[in-house]
Amino acid sequence: MEIENIDIRYPLPGRELEIAEAHEIEALKERSQQPIPDPDEWLDEELRRNIVLTSVDAVINWAQRSSLWPVICFPACCAFELIASQASRFDLSRFGMEILRASPRQADLMITAGTLVWKMAPQVKRVYDQMAEPKWVIAMGSCGITGGIFRSSYNVVPGYNRIVPVDVYVPGCPPRPEALLYGIMTLHKKISKRSITEMDSKR
């Protein structure tokens, strides 16, 4: 089949078309001296969303303060305020402390309260020594801090800090659950400043 009478019209004659194409190519070469940046901003954003920089101290301290397991040591009258702090209104479980341990070997926080007599002091010391390291002590109430109204008696220990090292004092007779919660949060702040490279001299 033969095709005839086809009129192919170019906007420019042959030689001028070649010159125009050459100018266009040279202009493109001039504009293309530097590579165009790769469209990989999404990669940087993905990395920013999925990489968290922290320290070993921060991770360990966060884990320890978020899962304190308390053991109760002679709570006496303050037991009612401690029980109230465990109930739904104050909810100690939000701090990871919903289970009060019956064995000191499963606990790392001792909440001491009530009058301590010298005859029972060795038992308190024994409970503390059996707790897992690292361990902390909260002295709750006036009796736990100074011996309370019985401190002048010959058989009363004038504060649990004579027997075990105390980290946080919660004053009151008895202190309200809000005070105990404040003491626990104060202990959290103290734990968050610890370093695994430092040895605690009082332990």
Image (tube, rainbow, N blue to C red):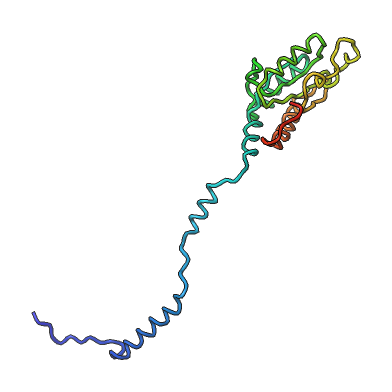
Residue 195 lies left or right of residue 77; in this view the side is: left
Residue 155, percent from left and from top: 86, 10
Query: Residue at (86%, 20%) from the top-left corner?
Result: 146
Residue 130, percent from left and from top: 68, 17
Whether residue 77 is situated above or below residue 35 in the rendered picture: above
Residue 136 lies left or right of residue 149; in this view the side is: left
Which quarter of the picture shows residue 162?
A: top right
Whether residue 46 is situated above or below residue 151 in the rendered picture: below
Residue 188 lies left or right of residue 157; in this view the side is: left
Whether residue 45 is situated above or below residue 14 in the rendered picture: above
Q: Nearer the viewer, residue 79 or 37?
A: 37
Residue 25, percent from left and from top: 38, 81
Query: Residue at (71%, 37%) from the top-left corner?
Result: 193
Q: How many marks?
A: 0
For the C terminus, the quadrant is top right
Residue 95, percent from left and from top: 65, 29
Query: Residue at (30%, 91%) from the top-left corner?
Result: 15
For the N terminus, the quadrant is bottom left
Query: Residue at (44%, 75%) from the top-left corner?
Result: 32
* The furthest residue to the right: 152
